[in-house]
Image (cartoon, grey):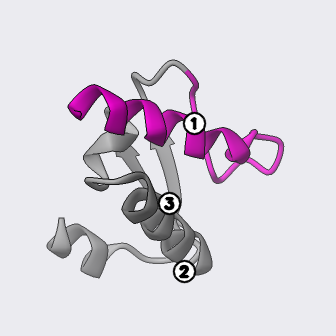
Amino acid sequence: MQALLGYARGGDVIVVHTLDRLGRTVRETLNLIHDLHQRGIGIRNLADPFRIDSTNPDDPVGLLAVVALFGQMERT
């Protein structure tokens, strides 16, 4: 993960199976997504109930918290 984050550049899109792969808690996941957004790096998930593509300005990124919460709840 650290190698990926160090290698990613603006315009890249990181594709994950589910958002819970990005962090252990909702806060950690949202902080990472925010940091990546600030660097111009998008996130796209494949298997969560809501598909997220942070590179698409019309995408409901506000649902990220809900999806990340579901991931945390499943682990708990």
Q: Is 40 drawn above or below residue 13 in the view shown?
A: below
| Mark 2 secondary-structure assignment | loop
Point 43% across, 30% down: residue: 70
Residue 61 colored in magenta in the image: yes
Residue under pointer 3 = 30
Sequence-earlier tag: 1 or 3? 3
Please identify, in this view, whether the residue under mark 3 or under mark 2 is nearer the observer. 3
Q: x%, y% of residue 60?
A: 75, 39
User: Depth check: 74 or 1 in front?
Assistant: 74
In the picture shown, does residue 22 fall above or below 36? above
User: Is there CB contact under 8 Å for labels 1 and 2?
Assistant: no
Say what amino acid the circle numbered 2 marks: Arg
Residue topped by disc 2:
39
Which residue type carries mark 1?
Val
> Quadrant where the C terminus lies?
top left
Calculate the distance from the C-alpha at mark 1 to the C-alpha at mark 2.
Answer: 23 Å
Give how far across and how far down residue 56 sits, in percent: 72, 47
Between the C-alphas of marks 1 and 3, the distance is 11 Å
* Quadrant of the image containing the N terminus: bottom left
